[in-house]
């Protein structure tokens, strides 16, 4: 593809100029596949997650379609509605629309809960072409008659499965009921559980289906490694790793909110500035943490899966799985944060004595062994038996002509606490994770049967109801099967090498003379990272070779 490819997708000059300013040269697969159809007015089912370029895939055509009709939005009556599950995602979408639409005269507003509504009401009163909203606040505004949806021409439901997880579907359905029947509808979801299949049926009309699942290729691009470490030594190991200046921008995942707080606190005591981000934090605290992390003022962000989801931070150098997720697909999502939009990254996992099974599940899913780099501070935790890693079982039974398959029946999550990050009505429930799938930029654009009766402008809107794809609701009847696991047996002895003595180097994470860590070398066991150094490879700042030892 060449620079002209965005133009060949049919995008207008003002949008091309905006893309050029952002140095977007090549459309991502979802953009290449979705944009031409969206410009024709087709409805779209996008099976894609954050990191695939989906925001531009729907924003660019939406902006172009709205700009083609020089109507100004009337007060309180937006022309396009984008619904997103979290404030962070809504804000990012709003920012993207503003950036891509900078040469157009369209007004964009973002509304979400947890903040005062007056500025949002003011924006709506002035007239908004594109309204990006979380469902709870939008309903509140509608109930107070500050927002009417009868002029909405384009609807985008982003991260629909996350809406489901957060208990937003009833709100979403109430909102959908207020939309005009004739409209252009898009739905994006990383997975397709049955409720989302049903929702898609109810709102999309002859949709184009575009599926971009980044797992496999993302995993290939990431240098992965695992430390076996005792549970109570993880924080010390983390601090030791973060002492390496190569960890320029590190996202640390914990399973719980309290865990995130504890880890961030420990890092801060050790003189490494870290912020925790999760659903118990106020909106302001989350925004401060995120902007410090994005701006490079703070090098370490500790997050739960839910809080991290939708956060678009480029140039994350390292992802640390402080706790291994009990849903293997979450591991793939997590480490994918360090390989956004074609970049590479480094992922380090800590595996304690209770997590061997999770590690095995992950290795089965990614179909490879994760190299062991050390034993943390723990007495050697045995490596789970190195059974050949079989291809992951994909109990998917999808009729070939059924475009609406569900991805998974699993009903697990690693976020046990009810409040969800960034939502205005946080009701997190267990979330099915996506199955492993083709690489990020490997499209699967199997499309549902008949195309619509001509492009949108010719159709003059769409009759609803007719022409659904065949067998729309086939549901995979099988639950994910977990094989019984043999007891872990020591198999791959840890490899240790004495760490070469290094002179102290200035550290970007810590102010000179900052507080001392809790015990600089608290663990007397083998050096945790003295073995092979899979995450110090070229292009990543030298990895552990530059580690600054504490004394
Ligand atoms: P998204 O999946 O929409 O959250 O996008 C993920 C990241 O990729 C964001 O930082 C976008 O700014 C970036 N991005 C989207 N499209 C492109 C593109 N065609 N070229 C380069 N970066 C892109």
Image: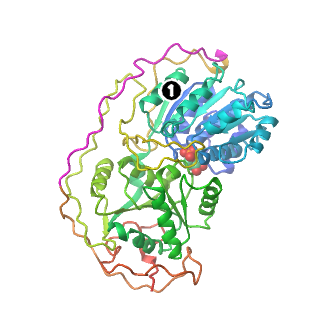
Q: Quadrant of the C terminus?
A: bottom left
Residues 41 and 325: in front is 325
Highlighted magenta segment, given as a residue range: 458-486
| Residue 216 place in picture, x, y as percent | 38, 47
At which x and y percent is residue 265? 51, 69
Which residue occupies 39% across, 81% down? 521
Q: Indicate the quadrant where residue 527 lies.
A: bottom left
Residue lying at 51% horizontally and 66% vertically, measured from the top left: 264
Residue at the (51%, 49%) spot, across then down: 309
Front residue of 244 and 220: 244
Q: Quadrant of residue 526?
A: bottom left
Q: Is residue 311 magenta?
A: no
- Residue 481 on the magenta span: yes
Looking at the image, residue 287 lies above or below residue 494: above
| Horizontal and vertical percent position of residue 532 | 32, 70
Residue 37 visible to the viewer: no
Say if 230 sits above or below 411 in the image: below
As drawn, is 438 to the left or to the right of 166? Answer: left
Which residue in the protein does label 1 denote? 200
The number of discs equals 1
């Amino acid at each position: 593809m060449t620079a002209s490819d965005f133009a060949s997708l049919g995008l207008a000059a003002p949008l091309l100029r905006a893309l050029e300013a952002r140095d977007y040269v090549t459309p991502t697969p979802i953009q290449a596949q979705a944009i031409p159809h969206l410009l024709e007015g087709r409805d779209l089912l996008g099976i894609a997650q954050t990191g695939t370029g989906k925001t531009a895939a729907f924003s660019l055509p939406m902006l172009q379609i709205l700009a083609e009709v020089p109507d100004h939005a009337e007060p309180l009556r937006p022309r396009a509605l984008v619904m997103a599950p979290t404030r962070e995602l809504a804000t990012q979408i709003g920012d993207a629309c503003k950036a891509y639409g900078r040469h157009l005269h369209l007004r964009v507003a973002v509304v979400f809960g947890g903040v005062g509504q007056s500025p949002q009401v003011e924006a709506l009163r002035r007239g908004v072409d594109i309204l990006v909203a979380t469902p709870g606040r939008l309903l509140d505004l509608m109930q107070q008659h500050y927002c009417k949806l009868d002029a909405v021409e384009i609807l985008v439901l982003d991260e629909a499965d996350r809406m489901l997880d957060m208990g937003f579907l009833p709100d979403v359905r109430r909102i959908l009921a207020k939309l005009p029947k004739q409209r252009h509808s898009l739905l994006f979801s990383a997975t397709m559980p049955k409720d989302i299949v049903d929702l898609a049926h109810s709102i999309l009309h002859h949709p184009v289906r575009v599926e971009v699942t980044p797992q496999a290729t993302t995993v290939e691009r990431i240098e992965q490694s695992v430390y076996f470490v005792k549970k109570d030594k993880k924080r010390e190991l983390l601090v030791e790793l973060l002492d390496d200046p190569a960890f320029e921008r590190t996202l640390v995942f914990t399973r719980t909110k309290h865990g995130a707080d504890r880890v961030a606190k420990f890092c801060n005591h050790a003189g490494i500035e870290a912020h925790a981000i999760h659903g118990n934090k106020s909106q302001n605290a989350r925004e401060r943490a995120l902007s410090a992390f994005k701006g490079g003022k703070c090098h370490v962000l500790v997050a739960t899966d839910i809080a991290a989801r939708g956060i678009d931070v480029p140039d994350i150098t390292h992802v640390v799985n402080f706790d291994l997720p009990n849903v293997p697909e979450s591991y793939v999502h997590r480490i994918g944060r360090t390989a956004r939009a074609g970049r590479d990254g480094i992922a380090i996992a800590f595996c304690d004595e209770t997590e061997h099974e999770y590690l095995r599940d992950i290795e089965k899913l990614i179909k490879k062994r994760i190299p062991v780099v050390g034993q943390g501070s723990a007495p050697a935790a045995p490596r789970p038996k190195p059974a050949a890693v079989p291809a992951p079982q994909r109990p998917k039974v999808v009729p070939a002509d059924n475009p609406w398959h569900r991805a998974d029946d699993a009903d697990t999550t690693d976020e046990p606490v009810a409040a969800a990050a960034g939502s205005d009505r946080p009701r997190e429930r267990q979330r099915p994770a996506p199955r492993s799938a083709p690489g990020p930029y490997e499209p699967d654009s199997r499309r549902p049967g008949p195309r619509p009766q001509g492009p949108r402008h010719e159709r003059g809107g769409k009759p609803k109801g007719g022409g659904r794809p065949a067998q729309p609701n086939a549901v995979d009847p099988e639950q994910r099967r977990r094989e019984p696991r043999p007891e872990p047996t020591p198999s791959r002895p840890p490899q240790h090498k004495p760490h070469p003595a290094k002179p102290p180097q200035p550290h970007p994470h810590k102010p000179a003379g900052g507080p001392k860590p809790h015990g600089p070398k608290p663990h007397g066991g083998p050096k945790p990272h003295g073995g092979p150094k899979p995450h110090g490879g070229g292009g990543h700042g030298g990895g552990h070779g530059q580690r600054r030892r504490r004394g």
